[in-house]
Amino acid sequence: MTTTIAPGLTLGPSDEATKAREQGYHLVSVHEAPPDDAPKADAWVPILIDVQTEDGVEERASPRMLDEAADAIAKAIKRGQRVFLYCGSSSERAPLVAAWYLWRSGQATTLDGAYDVVLEKRPGTRRRDSWILWDEPG
């Protein structure tokens, strides 16, 4: 299922990326690694980084990488392209990036408000702003 989140920005799962490419979308992937089962993305930004914790290694969202993803989306939209933002099922990573983009682009005044927009438009999204590693190591 694909969902339009904002003008020029649509979220969807990996298995819809080929169809989106055929429809002329600019593809932005936020997988950990480029997926084998989707067309090559125009921009690939692995938003998650490994963080060593006392209990082992956790994957956390890097604000720097979230900014890179938001920038990739903003640049494509500014060029007049429609963006298809995707991860595996588009229920966690891509919605986090969409919320970050809405906040960073000024379409929402807070990250919470931006996430509310995404959650309203895409029911079933799992909120993952707790993943953000605000004190990112050097």
Image (cartoon, rainbow, N blue to C red):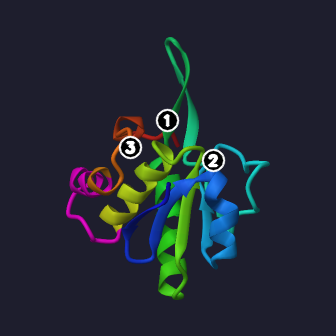
Residue visible at 49% across and 52% down in the picture: 94
Whether label 3 touches label 1, CB < 8 Å: no
Q: Earlier in the sequence, mark 2 or mark 1?
A: 2
Left or right side of 130 for 60: right
Q: Earlier in the sequence, mark 3 or mark 1?
A: 1
Residue 2 spot, x, y in % from top left = 49, 59
Vertically, is 92 above or below 113? above
Identify the amino acid type marked 3.
Thr
Residue at mark 1: 60
Residue at mark 2: 31
Secondary structure category for the residue under label 3: loop
Can residue 44 be seen in the rendering of this structure? no
Q: Nearer the viewer, mark 3 or mark 1?
A: 3
Q: CA distance from mark 3 to mark 2?
A: 16 Å
Q: CA distance from mark 3 to mark 1?
A: 18 Å
Residue visible at 53% across and 72% down in the picture: 83
Magenta-highlighted residues: 105-118
Determine which of the numbered discs, if any, sits on residue 125 in the image. Answer: 3
Identify the amino acid type marked 2.
His
